[in-house]
Amino acid sequence: MVRVEPRSDGDGGMGAVTRRRMLALGGAAALPSARRGAAQDGPVTIIVPFTPGTGMDILARLAAPALQEALGQPVVVENRPGASGNIGTQAVARAAPDGRTLMLTANTFVMNPRLFRQVPYDPVAGFTPIIHLTDGELVFAVHPAVPAMTLRDLAALAARETVNYASPGIGTPQHLAMELFRLEIPGRPAMNHVPYRGSAPAVQDLLAGRVAAMVLPLHTALPLAADGRVRLLAIGSPARSPTAPAVPTTAEADSPGVVVNLWYGLFGPAGLPSALVARLNAALRAWLARPATRQQLQAQGMAPAADTSSTALAAMVARDAARWAGVIEAAGITAD
């Protein structure tokens, strides 16, 4: 059983930026436009269940002005961290389905119910999916001193000796991605998970060689690889990334089941009116289509989702909830 220190509520494994940069992106949208409001008058609150500066927080603050323009009423972003995202998520699940309370979150949302003995929400039945906004690519990386040039080599090394790998915390997408890879290695060899309280200290120990491997967001890994401080073995996306075309996919490295990424979506409480869902979805699709938006997202290591429909998000939540529940059970992972 994998059971060590609980992960930090700091970044949920999503990465972070400086507070100055985060503030430059804008906290809440400015003045409302003259367009009609949403379901009720008053501000719309987007709850982010993690701290400021995380990927989902940045995305919420970038998207808020577009929603405000479309709805004609103030849109504010509220960080409500705690319990690995469960506190803020529960608040949205209990909110009235009137469009006044929304949530922008990431795929930790579907992982938590199997990581904790008691989770105060159902990711499938407890929310109304609105839009799958963006994806972030993940890459398998090792310290240059590790005798592994490919993901196949890392699997062979793990079969011979224990490999220490870092993650931003128990149950983060990076942790579960590495466990998914381990479970695909014949014999399921032991790999020693070293969880940290956030991304920064984990990356620091990878660079120092205190751990051998880590799954990293691609935009974090690329400059480190360019400096020769890490070696990139494979990317978890279905196809090679245009920003790292030389890095093979996990499928090309004999691990076709290890397709993993970070995804970000907007949700409301269960029972949100379909007309409001369609309106919010249309406003954010238009925002995602702007060249300036794509540039902003690229700077954060994100890209607009290929299918932004609410039905696609609903299907992805159901599929990922089942998939990661199986990984967590097979690996014996608990977070409390």
Image (cartoon, rainbow, N blue to C red):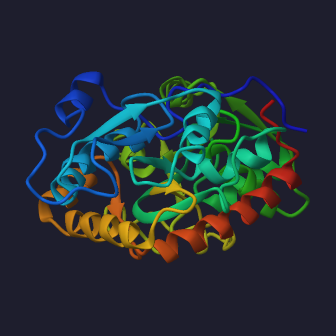
Q: Quadrant of the C terminus?
A: top right
Q: State the residue in front, 200 or 57.
A: 57
Instruction: Decide if residue 22 is on the left or right side of residue 69.
Output: right
Q: What residue is at 15 percent from the left and 55 percent from the top?
A: 69
Q: Is residue 253 above or below residue 144?
A: below
Position of residue 74 measured from the top left corner of the image (x, y, whole percent): 22, 42
Residue 263 appears in the picture as rendered: no
As drawn, 158 above or below 71: above
Residue placed farthest to the front in the image?
40
Q: What is the tally of numbered marks visible in this picture? A: 0
Measured from the top left, where is residue 12 in percent x and y?
55, 36
Quarter of image, res 274: bottom left
Q: x and y percent of residue 65 in the render? A: 19, 48
Task: Report whether 45 appears left or right of 230.
Answer: left
For image coordinates 51% across by 26% down, the residue present is 10
Relative side of 84 to 61, left or right: right
Quarter of the image where the N terminus is located: top right
- Please provide percent x and percent y for residue 167: 62, 36
Residue 53 shows up from this direction: yes
Is 2 left or right of 216, judged from the image as shown?
right
Q: Nearer the viewer, residue 326 or 251?
A: 326
Residue nearest the observer in this picture, 72 or 182: 72
Looking at the image, which residue is at 58% across and 57% down? Answer: 127
Please state which of residues 192 and 305 is positioned toward the viewer in this rendering.
Answer: 305
